[in-house]
Image (cartoon, rainbow, N blue to C red):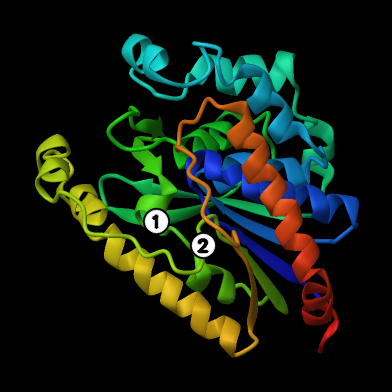
């Protein structure tokens, strides 16, 4: 039986996902394929590299470092998430990713990116984090619009995968997994509201299809929420989502907020543990 996993993004809300993944690793829940979006991709790689606790550890340690992410990085590099610090310094020196475990894992891992020329989602298989293109696709998946430069790969330009496909349920349902688990980072009652429609048109006037994708994101996202809720009712997928609202910023610096979001992941997965196991084992 093959199990597929969808990981929604959401910046530091992804610490909820981090704890769910840590529990999966601790309990030896074997996932065959993962599709990660934005922070879901950036944090999800730690399941494939089998590094329990790494996400919380490096975020707590470096969140207040001006070279990690925030306004200093944005003003000095043009990216809210510092490319050199996040995708070289941390992963190679300060809290290294286990490249060999990742590469030799049987888990199929995909990162969602948005092509800013077409405004469409692309699903990139990330096999080897030492491969420069693979790492760049991963960086692109988590590069938020307005506060990130487009990531150029093979003459294409990419940004945040969540713009074009926030919860890639259609994609994973097409991939012939026997069971699908979806980890969301907002409570059940959440719905995205329509945002300022003029700003994307002005800021991304050279990329009108991307601007259109940003302006229609709220509608796409809410439709995907409705779809996963319906599939859950039909017993076709299993959803893990925050049981309550925790006010945490996408670019958060408060270590207590990190811990609170992380702990909620454990609390919720413990409550759902019997149901999850029944879902996985039921044929």
Residue 202 lies in quadrant: top left
Image side of residue 143 versus residue 22, left or right: left
- Indicate the quadrant containing the C terminus: top left, top right, bottom left or bottom right: bottom right
Q: Nearer the viewer, residue 48 or 24?
A: 24
Residue bearing the label numbered 2: 187
Residue bearing the label numbered 1: 121
State whether residue 113 appears in this view.
yes
Classify 10 Å Cα crowding around label 1: few (below 14), some (14-19), many (20 and above): many
Classify 10 Å Cα crowding around label 2: few (below 14), some (14-19), many (20 and above): some
Above or below, 153 against 189 in this view is above
Above or below, 234 against 276 in this view is below
Give me the residue at 82% from left, 39% from top. Answer: 52
Question: What secondary structure is marked by label 2?
Answer: loop
Image side of residue 231 versus residue 109, left or right: left
State whether residue 127 appears in this view.
no
Residue 226 lies in quadrant: bottom left
Give me the residue at 35% from left, 52% from top. Answer: 163
- Indicate the quadrant containing the N terminus: top left, top right, bottom left or bottom right: bottom right
- The location of residue 269, given as percent across then percent down, is 75, 61
Q: Do labels 2 and 1 touch, CB within 8 Å? A: no
Q: Nearer the viewer, residue 41 or 116?
A: 41
Q: CA distance from mark 2 to mark 1?
A: 25 Å
Give me the residue at 19% from left, 48% from top. Answer: 211
- The location of residue 51, given as percent across then percent down, is 81, 37
User: Nearer the observer, disc 2 or disc 1?
Assistant: 2
């Amino acid at each position: 039986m093959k199990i597929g996993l969808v990981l929604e993004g959401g910046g530091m809300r992804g610490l909820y996902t981090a704890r769910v993944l840590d529990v999966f690793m601790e309990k030896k829940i074997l996932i065959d394929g993962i599709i990660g979006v934005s922070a879901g991709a950036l944090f999800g790689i730690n399941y494939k590299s089998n590094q329990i606790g790494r996400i919380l550890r490096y975020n707590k340690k470096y969140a207040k470092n001006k070279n990690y992410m925030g306004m200093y990085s944005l003003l000095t590099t043009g990216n809210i998430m510092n490319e050199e610090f996040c995708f070289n310094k941390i992963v190679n020196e300060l809290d290294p990713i286990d490249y060999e475990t990742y590469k030799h894992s049987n888990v199929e891992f995909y990162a969602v990116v948005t092509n800013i020329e077409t405004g469409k989602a692309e699903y990139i298989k990330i096999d080897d984090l030492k491969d420069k293109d693979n790492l760049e696709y991963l960086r692109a998946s988590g590069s938020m619009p307005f506060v990130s430069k487009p990531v150029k790969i093979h003459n294409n330009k990419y940004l945040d995968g969540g713009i074009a496909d926030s919860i890639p349920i259609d994609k994973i349902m097409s991939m012939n997994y026997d069971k699908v688990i979806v980890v969301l980072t907002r409570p059940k009652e959440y719905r995205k509201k329509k945002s300022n429609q003029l700003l994307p048109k002005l800021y991304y006037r050279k990329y009108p299809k991307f601007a259109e994708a940003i302006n229609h994101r709220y509608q796409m996202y809410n439709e995907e929420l409705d779809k996963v809720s319906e599939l859950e009712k039909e017993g076709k997928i299993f959803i893990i989502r925050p049981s309550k609202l925790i006010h945490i910023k996408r670019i958060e610096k408060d270590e207590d907020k990190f811990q609170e979001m992380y702990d909620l992941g454990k609390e919720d997965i413990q409550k759902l543990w019997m149901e999850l196991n029944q879902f996985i084992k039921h044929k």
